[in-house]
Amino acid sequence: MASSIATVLRDNITFLKTSLLQIDIDLLTTNPTASSLFPYLTIAALALVANTLFHLTRAYPSIPFHVPVPEEALPGWKGGSMLKNPSIQDPARPDQIICYDPSTGRHLATIRAHTKADVATALTKARKAQAKWEKTTFAQRKIVLQSLLDFILLHQESICRVAARDTGKTMVDGKFGEILTTCERIRWTLAHGEDALKDEHRDPGLLMFYKSARVQYRPMGVVAALVSWNYPFHNTFGPLITALFAGNGILIKASEQVAWSTTTYFAQIARTCLEACGHDPDLVQFLVGFQECGEAVVTSGVDGITFIGSPQVGAKVATAASYNLTPCVLELGGKDVAIVNKDVDLEAVVPILMRGVFQNCGQNCIGLERIIVHESLHESLIEMAGSRIKQLKQGPPLEIENIDCGAMTMSGRNKALEGLVKEAVKEGATLVYGGEGYVHPKFPDGQFFAPTLITDLRPDMKIAQEEAFAPIMAVFKFKTLDEAITLANSTRYCLGSNVFSRNQKEGRYMMDRLKVGMSNLNDFGVNYLCQSLPFGGVGMSGYGRFGGPEGLRAVCHQKAMTMDRWPMLIQTFLPPVLQYPMNNVGDAIVVTRDLVNIIYAGWVGRVHAVFEIMKTLLVGANQPEQL
């Protein structure tokens, strides 16, 4: 009991620190008052109560473990040479991954890229470990997840620093995108995962009333996840949590862009957690490499694949997986929209739009790539958003305090983004702010793109059709609800969407007509936090789902089963007229006809069919057997 109380106090203190940090960030440009603080403090109090109840009522223990933090992520680290025009691959050393901090250009490590042979070895190890793991109980798996959750809560600062060092994201972006989402995935899985994977009883129907019908969800075996670089911790641990709880082993092929954080810290967290809980750490295998490695994983013979990335690569994954008929879940990015209706309060909505566009420098699959605002609010929105965007501070988040926007993780993105903006302006768009790469005075080798605001856009422009994955607020205007819907549906991407409207009826009208996999009213990004819901898109945004019961079941084989409901009383009996060899095919036809009518016809038809089938069977029983 004492250890449980200590855990509660520890987690509540950590949560309070995070909450107060967020309050400070949100109020940096405002004058805090009692009324402005009240919502934050109320939410914090409710969350503390919920956290306390969660800990004190849980029925599974936690095993502590330790993983050293890489020195490159520690405060004050100044090692590593500064790379000029850095790139993750050197043509002279194609088998090596050059890891560097994209916000400074500082070298972190050079790591060997995994090959096809490494993938085969990893799969062999995972299969051996999975053979033991699939025999574990849900209670044993919950201990692993609870231990992982407690480690994350204790070490969230270190996790965020490692992610920030490898991707250039800010610490606040890390708290939202790496920590909060992962913790909620674990919480939901602990609370509801077992129910989602229990045998599910189904209605056998009237014809089979004497049978029980059920669906079993059994682990596939060893699955693979090929995940993107924008949130290296969450994108890695999301599929890992799901796979392990369902009884699978997993190969995780992380992006070469985040090879350093994956191999030096995140992989060690997962493996050390398993080992501390008494399980084989080979159950999870981490791989980093270039195209050869990814192709080898897809064609290796794994039992299921989750891919997070671009439609172009996703199509190649699906094609390669088809040779082994390996089932896939593909999440292929989006061009998510926020429709702002004429009745909203911009003072409340604009801060949400700012977070939706500029979090993680726009490098979010469900980031707001298009803002479609009613023409009556257009000028006010541009003025309000423009004044905020001009105040955003950009730079390396681990070197400078109070940074709003970090770096672009991938090198070479600025030229393409500048081209999108310039082409749009040439075709009639208005560039309000930004639109070009930013050279930081103290860190000229950092990969920065200036926060951008552009408006007067049309759906036929390239910037309206291509996923920018960048800190660009692109604004469109509409007059009618149907025009807004048409604009929103004008792109091939169909992942998520958001509608802001005080009129719930109008908001629902638009949501129901958006061709997407997810939609939110008066909010942004909550699909990641509502873990009971399936996450995914349609069209060029992919197919399949992760998250919720659907996500857990997606890494399971679904087996349909029937059993005798009353085995001592009734079992299937085939009347002689239907047994092979049939003596009278005509009677067999009549009997099957009447059987269908007994089950499916109206009451008069059913009664008539009963008499007919009895007459046929009695007459057939009295006829001599044919030789």
Image: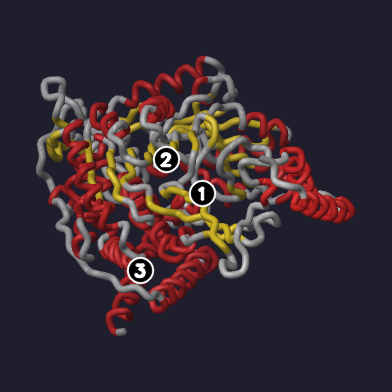
In the picture shown, does residue 336 fall above or below 73? Answer: above
User: Is tag 2's residue or tag 1's residue first in the polypeptide sequence?
Assistant: 2
Of 471 and 331, which appears nearest the observer?
A: 331
In the picture shown, does residue 240 fall above or below 626? Answer: below
Q: Nearer the viewer, mark 1 or mark 3?
A: 3
Residue drawn at x 60%, y 61% is 571
Q: What is the distance, in whole Å, between disc 2 and disc 3 at their CAs?
A: 34 Å
Is mark 2 in CB contact (under 8 Å) with mark 3? no
Q: Quadrant of residue 256?
A: top left
Callout 2: helix, strand or loop? loop
Please state which amino acid type lies under the numbered disc 3.
Ala
The residue beneath circle 2 is 364
In the rendering, at what x and y percent does residue 576 appear? 67, 50
Image position of 623 (left or right of 281): right
> What's the mark number on residue 139?
3
Callout 3: helix, strand or loop? helix
Q: What is the distance, in whole Å, between disc 1 and disc 3 at their CAs?
A: 24 Å
Q: Which scheme is used to colour this image of the protein?
A: secondary structure
Please state which amino acid type lies under the numbered disc 2.
Asn
User: Is tag 1's residue or tag 3's residue first in the polypeptide sequence?
Assistant: 3
Of 546 and 174, which appears nearest the observer?
A: 546
In the rendering, at what x and y percent does residue 508 appear? 69, 46
Quadrant of image for the C terminus: top right
> What's the mark number on residue 534?
1
